[in-house]
Image (cartoon, rainbow, N blue to C red):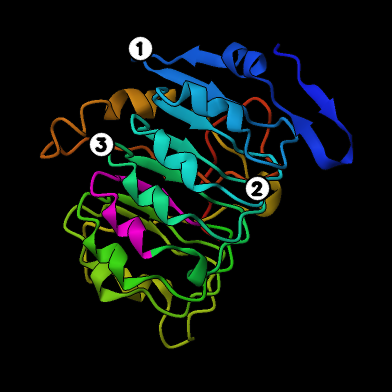
Amino acid sequence: MAKVKAKDKKGRKITLKTAKNSIRISFDGGRRLDLSKMGITTFPTCILKLADVDELDLSRNMLKKIPSSIEKFQKLRWLDLHSNQLEELPAAIGTLQSLFYLNICNNKLTTKGLPEELKLLKNLCILNLGLNCLDSIPTTLGEMKELQEIGVFDNALTTIPDSVKKLPKLKKLNAKRNPFPDSTKPEEHVDSIKRIETLYIVEEKDLCCQDERDKVNKLKNVISSPSNDPSFSSLLTPNSSAKNNQEEWRLKDK
C-alpha cells in the first residue's frame, strides 16, 4: 500500500511518488489514479503531472475546493469526488469533454455552487448529486442530452424541472428523501415518463459504494459511439461511512 507523508493538522501531503504508486490499470486498460481515503484537505497539485489518467478518485477525503487546474485532465472519463466538503465546483469542470461519470455525492454543494458550465459536459451519462444541499436543480441540466442516470436524493428539492424529466436518454432518477409537497410525491414527477425509474434509497447505516470497474468497462465506448444505449446497473449511493470493501448497495422500498 502506498505510503502517505504526514502534514500536521492541515492534513496529509501527497507526493508525486505516492501519486504514481497509486495508479492502477482498470479492466479496460485505462489508468486510474486512486487517492481516496487519504486524509487530503487540499487538492494535490503534484498530480497535475499525471493529468493523462483516464480515471481520478479523490473520494472520502476532506477537500473543500477543486481548483480550475482540473481542466488539465482532458482525458478523464470517470471522476469521483464523493464524501468530501465541497461547497462548489469550478467552472473549468465544463472543459472535461470526455467525462461520462461524475460522482459528487455527499458534499456540501448548494445550487449556486453548481456552475452553469456543467451543461457543457455533453458526453456525461451518470451524474450523482445526492446527499448535498441543493434547493433546486439547474434547468441547464436539461441540455445534457446523454444523461442516463441522475441521483439527487437527500437534498432540499421541492420539484424536478421538466427539462430534466424530458431528457431523451434518462432511465433512472433517484429523487428520494427530498421535501416535495405532499400533493406532489417524487413518483408523480416521473411516472408520466415510463422510461424513468425512481430508485429507493437505503437507510443511512446501509449506505455503501461499489467498485465500478465493471461500469467503466461497459461504458468505454460511449464517447466514440454516443448513439449506443448501454444497460446500466442501479445508481450507487456512496457516503463517508462507505465500506472499505466496496459492494453493491441494496435497494429497499421504505
- Look at label 2 and name its amino acid: Asn
- Look at label 3 and name its amino acid: Ser
Which element is circle 2 on?
Answer: loop
Residue at numbered disc 3:
231
Q: Position of residue 241 (x, y in %)?
A: 71, 42
Question: Residue at 13% of width from left, 32% of height from top?
Answer: 225
Q: Would residue 180 be visible to someone looking at this image?
A: yes
Q: Quadrant of the C terminus?
A: bottom right
Disc 1 residue crowd, few under 14, some 14–19, many 20+, Cα 10 Å: few
Quarter holding residue 101:
top left
Question: Residue at 21% of width from left, 35% of height from top?
Answer: 230
Q: Which mark is residue 147?
A: none
Residue at numbered disc 2:
84
Which element is circle 3 on?
Answer: loop
Residue at numbered disc 1:
29
Magenta part of the protein: which range?
116-129
